[in-house]
Image (cartoon, rainbow, N blue to C red):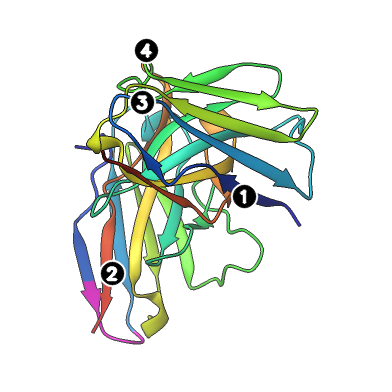
Amino acid sequence: QLQLQETGPGLVQPSETLSLSCSVSGDSISSNIYYWGWIRQPPGRGLEWIGSMYYTGGTYYKPSLESRVTISVDTSNNQFSLKLKSVTAADTAVYYCARQGARTYFYVDVWGKGTTVTVSS
Amino acid sequence: QSVLTQPPSVSAAPGQKVTISCSGSSSNIGNNYVSWYQHLPGTAPKLLIYDNIKRPSGIPDRFSGSKSGTSAALDITGLQPGDEADYYCATWESNLSAGGVFGGGTKLTVL
């Protein structure tokens, strides 16, 4: 059974870079139909798609975050990561890593449990 | 402000039926598939519907999806107290700013 697990610091200083990793178990990240990506939920707000990546390198990012976001895949360790630079309090959220359907077939069928990241000094 | 519009809240009594709507445009719902999610506090969201109408294994047929033009809907019949949760629609945005988009979410209260 496919499982995803987020790891990373729970507290990040303003203006620093948020870095999270997602370990994939139970399937290969080199699946030929799925994208791997990140979704977040700020406190009291709804779900927000951040971006996704295919294992060969194609990426999509939310336009308003694109200048600050990088998603990368490490096929040798079956994991992928999120980097969000120049964070502010507005980036405080529960961050989920997820397996996603591709483009027009977009859906999220497997989610990590989520990790809370607080941006504060 | 999401590009997909959902009612903030809906409510109904146990055993009744409720419909949650999701309105978009030709660049998202109109030309892409819609999915629906149930989100309980403190847990990861759960996929209920994908490709407009399909249910993943294990999702009861009380949950059904539909799509017409630039709108989609999630029907829940035989409401149970455990259905009380936040529900989100999602799809792909195909314009120059391509990417996934979620609706703002709908809080379902089972009276």
Q: Nearer the viewer, mark 4 or mark 3?
A: 3
Residue range in magenta is B11-15
**Do marks 4 and 1 share a subunit?**
no
Position in image of residue B76 (x %, y %):
40, 70
Q: Which mark is residue A5?
A: 1
Amino acid type, mark 2: Leu
Q: Secondary structure at mark 1?
A: strand
| The C terminus of chain A: image quadrant | top left
Q: Is residue B46 left or right of residue B7?
A: right
C-beta proximity under 8 Å, tags 4 and 1: no
Measure the alpha-carbon separation of dots 2 and 1: 29 Å
Please identify the dominant SS of the magenta region.
loop
- What residue is pinned by disc 4? B96
Measure the alpha-carbon separation of dots 4 and 3: 29 Å
Measure the alpha-carbon separation of dots 2 and 3: 38 Å
- On the question of residue B21 being in view, the answer is yes
Chain bearing tag 1 is: A
- What residue is pinned by disc 3? A16
Q: Nearer the N terminus, badge 2 or badge 4?
A: 4
- What residue is pinned by disc 2? B108
C-beta proximity under 8 Å, tags 2 and 3: no
